[in-house]
Image: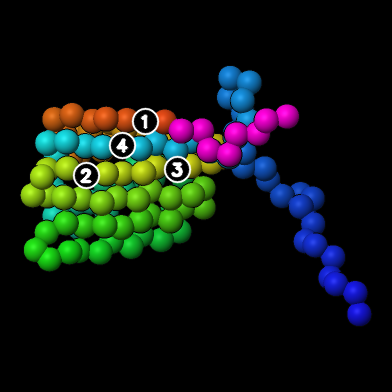
Amino acid sequence: MSAPAPPSTQGKQDYFVTRAGKRYAGVHLIIDLHGASHLSDAAYIENTLRRCIEASRATLLHIHLHRFEPDGISGVAVLAESHISVHTWPESRFAAFDVFMCGDTDPHACIDIMREAFEAERADIQELLRGEVHE
């Protein structure tokens, strides 16, 4: 008996991004919010994630948030185009978000939404191009 043929990729959409002459899997934003508020409120965080997902034109598959005692929340919004993760330290008024998206999305749309929603005094942002293709 021979091994089954690998699944065909014909007709499947390519979710890699091409921008400024570079081809890569997606944009990964690291967003650190300092002096932030609402970091213990899971419903508020979930609503903000949903706003980010809609604004970035991503497709939500699932959100899971875990509340720590006495404070802090960690979680992830799993997207068809990748994910948004969050970790909060309310006692330090700090939140760390990772926004990774591929395809026809706009992960940068999350930046202002997060900055305003969490009333951050400062936002430090780094951008990585993940999976860059070198031909």
Task: Look at label 3 and name its amino acid.
Answer: Phe
- Image quadrant for the C terminus? top right
Residue extending furthest toward the bottom: 1
Q: Helix, strand or loop at disc 4?
A: strand
Name the N-terminal-most of marks 2 and 3.
2
Q: Are marks 4 and 1 in contact (CB under 8 Å)?
A: no
Which residue is the site of mark 1? Answer: 126
Q: Which residues are magenta?
A: 128-135
Q: Position of residue 9 (x, y in %)?
A: 76, 52
- Seen at 16% across and 36% down, the residue is 34
Q: Are marks 3 and 4 in contact (CB under 8 Å)?
A: no
Which residue is the site of mark 3? Answer: 100
Work out whether residue 80 can be spotted.
Answer: yes
Residue extending furthest toward the front: 134
Name the N-terminal-most of marks 3 and 1.
3
Q: Are marks 3 and 1 in contact (CB under 8 Å)?
A: no
Which image quadrant for residue 8? Answer: bottom right
The vertical placement of 55 against 8, above or below, is above
The vertical placement of 18 against 91, above or below, is above
Work out whether residue 57 can be spotted.
Answer: no
Which residue is the site of mark 2? Answer: 95
